[in-house]
Amino acid sequence: MALLETKGVSIQFGGLWAVKDVDFLIDAKEIVGLIGPNGSGKTTFLNIISGVYRATHGAVTLQGEDISALRAYSIFKKGIARTYQSSRLCWDLSVADNILTGLYSKQMNGFWDVILRPRRVDSEIYDSLQECMDILSYFNPGLFKRRYELAKNIPHIDRRRIEICRALVGQPAVLLLDEPTAGLNGEETMQMMKDIHKIREINKDICIIIIEHDMKVMESVPERIVVFNAGQKIAEGIYNEIVRDKDVISAYLGGAAI
Ligand SMILES: Nc1ncnc2c1ncn2[C@@H]1O[C@H](COP(=O)(O)OP(=O)(O)O)[C@@H](O)[C@H]1O
Ligand SMILES: [Mg+2]
């Protein structure tokens, strides 16, 4: 059984099929790249998996359980975490507090506990913070030193790192990365590639779906690549097969060799 599977997943906006009939699977420890022209449905596909949209047709299963009808919050709790194409952080919170929000779904104490069992609440917050800081200090020691600075004062590449740490702290089974190198220059893209490899040192069983335009990233990061065009999956394989695939070349690059 695959860790995460979609069968015949489709979604329509108005008259347009943004994603159409996509069968996809990924196993634990796998990294799969998702490429395709702008508007080909990549982000929408991740939105369906993470519960931001509900598919018009088809099913998404996680470890055999149908999660298609669950809301984003419940899907996150079940172990699918993500980052966004454009950073979504709480700009007036510190780096540490932003990462801490990733553990919200795992925290057991509620409103009454704050009043009735303050020590238990304090200890939960302490443990959560410790976990967040362990991950951040391992993932990026430089950013760890800036953990009390506000997110709005942090450079773009570090904002992306905060988002990745926030997604990682809940120990997700699946991580969805939507264009983690968008807006980064060549040197920063190389750094981000190293960071993505580091994710597996933090969580060795995690599987990752990464949307990316940069073919250098696609060559070195994923083990397998899936290609979308006009909402449909048009090819799937290892990098060397994909870059020679005629359908991929004509859809993705208007006929020019990759
Ligand atoms: N909420 C929405 N309402 C209407 N159309 C949408 C919505 N989300 C995505 N789309 C459309 O779906 C198509 C695929 O978009 P998207 O998944 O963002 O593409 P990609 O990430 O591959 O660039 C586009 O035509 C886009 O305009
Ligand atoms: Mg997109």
Image (cartoon, helix red, strand yellow):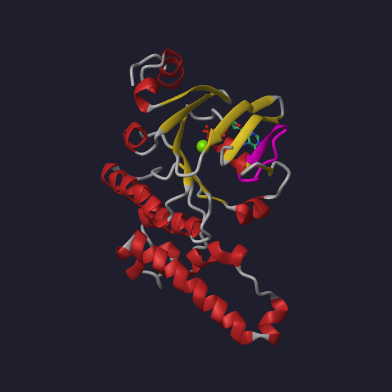
> Can residue 92 be seen in this snapshot?
no
Front-most of residues 73 and 7? 7
**At x 65% / y 45%, what residue is drawn?**
51
For residue 238, above or below residue 125: above
Q: Quadrant of residue 189?
A: top left
| Image point (39%, 70%), residue name | 147
- Part of the protein shown in magenta: 50-61
Q: Quadrant of the N terminus?
A: top right
Q: Quadrant of the C terminus?
A: top left
Left or right position of 6 against 209: right
Q: Estimate the x, y position of residue 156 in percent, counting from the top left.
A: 38, 54
Residue 7 lies left or right of residue 130; in this view the side is right
Q: Is residue 60 magenta?
A: yes
Position of residue 93 measured from the top left corner of the image (x, y, whole percent): 49, 68
Q: Residue at x 69, y 85 (%)?
A: 115
Identify which residue is drawn at 64% across, 71% down: 108
Which percent across, then down, holds residue 166? 49, 59
Could you tell me if residue 15 is visible in this image?
yes
Q: Residue furthest left?
A: 187
**Quick one: 185 or 118, which is closer to the camera?**
118
Residue 225 x, y percent position in the rendering: 44, 30
Q: Is residue 226 magenta?
A: no
State which quadrant residue 66 falls in: top right
